[in-house]
């Protein structure tokens, strides 16, 4: 009976402390200096989360605000104009593992985000996991969570009392109490247990896989708790050994040998020997090798290293020191360029100069009036020699100065130089009409020739079989060259031609028309006789041209209608047999 009474009193004490803590936080206490219009806290799983926190309010159309988590796991979101209560979601990673965890705030103040806050939100919402609570957040959902939150926190703290006591966190509200990602107290517990919520079940395991707690989120108080699997309280780590420091340009690299059971390390430094954890400047959560940059040149720095775990911080290592490199002489601005020249061209000027020692780039300043300076000239940055300035006006004098530039600054200007662009080149005109055009007929072809036209780059030839040829009513042969031989023509046909000259400006007027006839087709006497005469007169015997002409004149056998020429008659006589 006595033991039963003691357990009951202990449970009442935990319940009362948790409830008071929650009530105080709801009024803004424990916020660590947060603004009265801010919700903030620490997002950590032992190590601080690296990522972002989003917050939804409880208005009918929920509004969302997001912020980035600081390096130490802290965050703050301005909730001015939003309606309380709020649900929060942290997404990020720690020690190479990704997390999505949740929390809840009844109003402004502290709302830490950690594995236990995630379980509390899911349980208070009656959801299988807190992601569903956040994704489906609306006014009714958040009011439900608010109504169940205090009882859920009490149930969880009561059930996990023995585990929390092991880490001096038995009176710590995971959501509203002061919480630092320093691997101590509640944060140290997160280093030594694995807390998961899946399918409505909360599981807490030690690092060897032993179950410490398992139970439904809807009934945390009646879950199974196995105190025998609570991990032993770790001892404070020993002082780091193998500490070394190496100086560099404005920096020192500090390294050390890893310490068994240490979860993080602190580095302390000073510029005087005899540094201690009390007198030195602290760098928390340092990793080896740690590079401290931004230091003064030629200065000796003294260092200690301590190891940290959930139990506490080790004694300090042996002091080490390192000296940063001596200061490098400050570079000077380069000298003014010399030997600058300028040469005018067609709508351009080319500016050249020798390289200047220590210069990393050059600027050109120019004007169309003498007396150009870096103040009144137009600037061309990052010029390289030779620099060609194009698009300038014709027959215009341009004045130039050049400066050299490096990381320190810009040199004085060079001596002014000048150059004048060339006069404008007259615009090309349409070429003149081709002259001297001739045409000579041949066997199924005509050869057309003409005199070269000054300024012409090509020629067009137009032709037709009817007189009066123009560029509009004829067939065009583009790019013709003289003499141009047109082949494949009809025998005994007259062809009419004109020629035009072409350049980039256009096409000239047409030349005077000329013409030429192709040769008449060759007369095949034997084929003609066999085709026309053989049927009436039989095979062609030996005949003279006179005999054939006499027969034609006498119209023997209708020969008078043949209309043969004397040459054709002679050709028939020549093939008679």
Image (cartoon, rainbow, N blue to C red):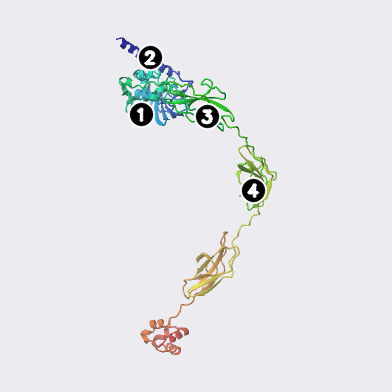
The quarter of the picture where residue 481 lies is: bottom right
Q: CA distance from mark 1 to mark 3?
A: 50 Å
Q: Quadrant of the C terminus?
A: bottom left
Mark 4 or mark 2: which comes first in sequence?
A: 2
Give the residue number, with chain letter if any, for mark 4: 352
> Which residue is farthest left?
1
| Disc on the earlier residue, 3 or 4 | 3
**Could you tell me if residue 467 is visible in this image?**
no
SS label for mark 3: strand
> Which mark is nearer the camera, 1 or 4?
4
Determine whether the residue tagged by mark 4 lies in a helix, strand or loop.
strand
- State the separation of the CA atoms marked 3 and 4: 51 Å
C-alpha separation, residue under disc 2 versus residue under disc 1: 30 Å
Residue topped by disc 1? 132
Residue 52 on image: x %, y %:
44, 29
Report the side of 511 relative to 57 (left or right). right
Sooner in the amino-acid sequence: mark 3 or mark 2:
2
- Report which residue position mark 2 lands on: 16
* Discs 3/4, front: 3
Q: How many marks?
A: 4
Vertical placement of residue 121 versus 532, above or below: above
Give the crowd class for mark 1: few <14, some 14-19, many >=20 residues within 10 Å: few
Answer with mark 2 or mark 1, whichever residue precedes in sequence: 2
CA separation, marks 4 and 2? 86 Å
N-term-proximal mark, 1 vs 4: 1
The label nearer to you, 2 versus 1, is 2
């Amino acid at each position: 009976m006595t033991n039963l009474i003691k357990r009951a009193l202990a449970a009442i004490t935990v319940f009362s402390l948790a409830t008071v803590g929650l009530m105080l936080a709801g009024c803004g206490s424990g916020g660590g200096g947060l603004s009265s219009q801010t919700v903030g806290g620490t997002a950590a799983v032992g190590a601080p989360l690296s990522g972002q926190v989003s917050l939804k309010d409880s208005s009918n159309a929920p509004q969302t605000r997001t912020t980035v988590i600081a390096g130490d796991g802290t965050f703050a979101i301005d909730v001015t104009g939003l309606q309380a209560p709020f649900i929060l979601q942290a997404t990020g990673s720690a020690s190479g593992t990704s997390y999505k965890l949740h929390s809840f705030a009844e109003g402004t103040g502290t709302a830490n985000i950690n594995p236990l806050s995630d379980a509390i939100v899911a349980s208070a919402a009656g959801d299988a996991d807190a992601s569903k609570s956040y994704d489906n957040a609306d006014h009714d959902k958040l009011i439900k969570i608010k109504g169940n939150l205090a009882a859920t926190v009490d149930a969880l703290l009561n059930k996990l009392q023995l585990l929390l006591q092991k880490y001096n966190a038995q009176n710590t509200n995971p959501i509203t109490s002061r919480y630092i990602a320093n691997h101590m107290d509640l944060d140290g517990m997160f280093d030594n247990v694995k807390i998961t919520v899946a399918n409505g079940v909360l599981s807490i395991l030690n690092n060897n896989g032993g179950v410490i707690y398992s139970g439904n989120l809807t009934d945390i108080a009646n879950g199974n708790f196995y105190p025998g699997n609570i991990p032993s309280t770790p001892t404070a780590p020993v002082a780091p050994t193998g500490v070394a420091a190496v100086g560099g340009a404005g920096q020192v690299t500090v390294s050390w040998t890893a310490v068994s059971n240490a979860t993080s390390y602190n580095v302390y430094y000073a510029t005087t020997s005899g540094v201690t954890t009390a007198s030195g400047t602290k760098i928390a959560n340092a990793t080896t090798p740690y590079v401290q940059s931004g230091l003064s040149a030629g200065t000796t720095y003294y260092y200690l290293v301590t190891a940290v775990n959930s139990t506490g911080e080790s004694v300090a290592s042996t002091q080490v020191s390192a000296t940063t490199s001596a200061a490098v002489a400050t570079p000077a601005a380069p000298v003014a360029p010399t030997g600058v020249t300028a040469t005018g061209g067609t709508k351009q000027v080319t500016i050249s100069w020798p390289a200047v020692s220590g210069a990393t780039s050059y600027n050109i300043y120019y004007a169309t009036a003498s007396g150009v300076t870096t103040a009144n000239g137009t600037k061309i940055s990052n010029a390289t020699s030779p620099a060609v300035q194009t698009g300038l006006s014709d027959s215009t004098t341009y004045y130039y100065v050049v400066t050299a530039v490096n990381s320190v600054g810009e040199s004085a200007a060079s001596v002014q130089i000048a150059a004048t662009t060339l006069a404008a080149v007259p615009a090309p005109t349409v070429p003149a009409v081709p002259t001297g055009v001739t045409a000579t007929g041949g066997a199924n072809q005509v050869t057309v020739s003409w005199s070269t036209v000054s300024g012409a780059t090509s020629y067009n030839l137009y032709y037709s079989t009817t007189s009066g040829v123009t560029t509009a009513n004829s067939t065009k042969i583009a790019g013709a060259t003289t003499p141009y031989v047109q082949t494949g023509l009809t025998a005994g046909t007259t062809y009419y031609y004109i020629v035009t000259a072409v350049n980039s400006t256009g096409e000239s007027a047409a030349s005077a028309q000329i013409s030429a006839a192709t040769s008449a087709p060759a007369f095949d006497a034997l084929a003609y006789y066999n085709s026309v005469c053989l049927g009436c007169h039989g095979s062609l015997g030996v005949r003279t041209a006179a005999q054939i002409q006499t027969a034609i004149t006498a119209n023997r056998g209708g020969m008078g209608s043949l209309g043969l020429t004397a040459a054709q008659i002679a050709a028939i006589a020549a093939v008679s047999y």
